Image (cartoon, rainbow, N blue to C red):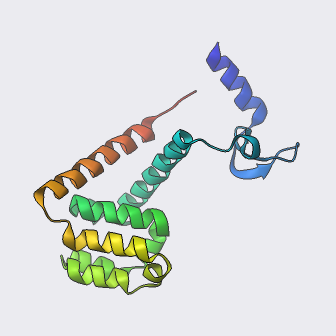
Amino acid sequence: MALHLIDDLKRFEGFRGKVYRCPGGRLTVGFGRNLEDNGVCVREAELLLLFDVAKVIEQLDTSMSYWRDFSAVVQCVLVQMGFQLGVGGLLGFRKFLGALRAGDLVQARAEMLNSLWARQTPRRAEYLSNLLVHNSSESDTLVWEDSIDELLFIVHRLKRMTLVK
């Protein structure tokens, strides 16, 4: 019964992946989600974030097949940068990526900090660049490995998820 209701709503509302104005003049997205009156709650925003991260990981797998060969810390840094800059933007950091591939984390950090990105978002750039060179204790490494493993598991599940037919 409930799924029939959802199917009807989807059929009559239609899907739009970009924000639009509904006939009532409200900013709307998806299957008639009124953003002006309803917005999104934290749990919904977290789910959107997971889907966005899943997309970044898919793009990294396609564009930088070697990214999973790096340590968990480096993988997390790449996901964060890919999320913020877009994977295309991340790929523009050729000297940074070259230093990573060469295993020169100090140079990779320097390349991160010598960028417009670092000048625009200095706190984030400093944090991520410090992760590369200072996060080397065994306990820290295990935390990052658990984090990336859990994230990759969630992403795998999201890719297979279908809520309603």
Residue displayed at 57% across by 27% down: 164
State the image coordinates of residue 92 (x, y, percent, origin top left). 43, 79
Q: Is residue 36 left or right of residue 85?
A: right
Q: Is residue 25 left or right of residue 91?
A: right
Report x, y in % for residue 88: 47, 71
**Quadrant of the snapshot with the N terminus:** top right
User: Number of numbered discs present?
Assistant: 0
Residue occupying the point 17% across, 57% down: 141
Q: Position of residue 14 (x, y in %)?
A: 74, 37
| Residue 62 in which image quadrant | bottom left
Identified at 15% across, 65% down, the residue is 136
As rendered, which of 16 and 79 lies closer to the eye? Answer: 79
Q: Is residue 6 above or below residue 79?
A: above
User: Which residue occupies the extreme right position in the image?
Assistant: 24
For residue 15, which quarter of the picture? top right
Residue at (35% x, 65% y) in the render: 78
Residue sticking out furthest to the bottom: 114
Q: Is residue 51 above or below residue 1?
A: below
